[in-house]
Amino acid sequence: MHYDWAGITSLAYLTLLELDLHEFPIPVKKIKCKDVLIRSYQKYALKTGLSIEEVTCGYELDDAFLLKGLRPDLTLILYNEEKYDSRTKHTLWHEVGHIKCNHQRHDDRAEIEAHFFAGQANAPNVIIREIAKRGYSIDIPFLIDCFGLSEESAMKKLDYFKRYHFDHTNENDDIVLVQFSNFINFKYPPKTQHFYDQYYDDLEKEREKWEL
Amino acid sequence: MRNSSFGYYIEQIRNEKGMSQRKLAEEAGLTNSTISRIEADLVKPDPATLEKLSNALNVDKTILLTKCGYSEIPEDFIVIARKTGDLSEKQRKKVYDIFNQTIDDFLLADDEEE
């Protein structure tokens, strides 16, 4: 099955740009999506007099779910605000991913794409790559501290990098870096002056060849 | 629950439009008593009556039909969640019914800023 990983990454990055976010971890309340109402089960229950059991269809819809087609132009994401933050964030990004990827039904492919979107919105590869270049080691404690990931999500992210390293680039990498540059510079200043050495090393090697 | 009933829904829309029951009856070509009984949830209007109400109140007929319990789940109604693959059609209908009956009240009461 073919997946457009670059396209999904672009959608995640464009969502971060659209929301005008500038630092990580992104608080739950700042996760939004244009023309979509994102509300908690608890709020929906309070405003309508329903019980949480009714809102979640007898707890079948435990974490969050997406509703479309109830009313013209209404898309609603409802989530359980009593889950811990890191899980809620991944879940909300996941639901936003369904919208951004224009999923019309639930199937395995839609789930995989939404998970990938959530992974990129929650902890963009381009930010991790930039911080690694500055001399920081990318491990589970780093991912938890920097992006507020759960340990499970951090392990999955690390596994991704072990498999694919930092080879994947995206057309929106530069603009995402600019948007989060203050955050990166403040929290992760270069540990050495050689953080962009690879690029200059390559140039230097080229130059040495010319001299020979 | 009265504030999620069809009669209350009609009453709310009529009030929002600044119409009296008499005025709505005139506009819809119905009797004053019919409007009163619908709003009190004493009768369930038939689809033809709902069409008259939708024209008089300038509300989508489909919404009135679904609010009144006539319609099946609309084709474009989507529920996506981790477990929806396991939701039976009966459960899907249940989700639709619950949210179809409450969404308008929620939207009116929702005070959260975007």
Image (cartoon, coloured by chain):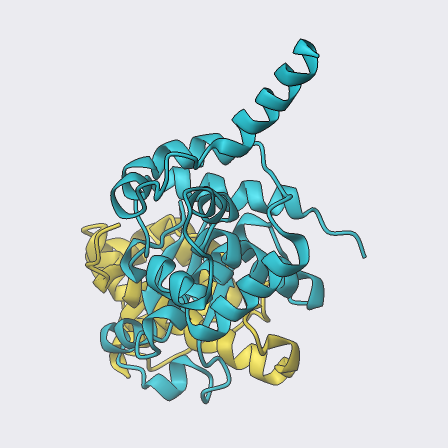
Chain colours: A cyan, B yellow
B89 w.r.t. B48: above or below: below
For the point 56% across and 78% down, the residue is B93
Observer-nearest of B18 and A80: A80
Q: Position of residue A131 (x, y in %)?
A: 42, 46
Quadrant (top left/top right/bottom left/bottom right) for the C terminus of chain A: top right
**Front residue of this view, candidates B33 and B114:** B114
Of B25 and A54, nearer the camera is A54
In the rendered image of this protein, does residue B42 appear above or below residue B6?
Answer: below
Taking the spot 44% from the left edge, 45% from the top edge, the residue there is A127
Q: Position of residue A111 (x, y in %)?
A: 62, 65
From where the camera sits, is residue A209 visible?
Answer: yes
Apparent side of residue A131 relative to residue A44 in the rendered image (left or right): right
Q: Is residue B29 visible?
A: no
Can you say whether B55 is above or below B97 in the image? above
Q: Is residue A83 left or right of residue A201?
A: left
Which of the 4 image quadrants contains residue B41?
bottom left
Percent coordinates x, y for residue A37 in the rendering: 36, 56
Outermost right residue: A1
Residue A12 percent across, percent down from the top left: 50, 46
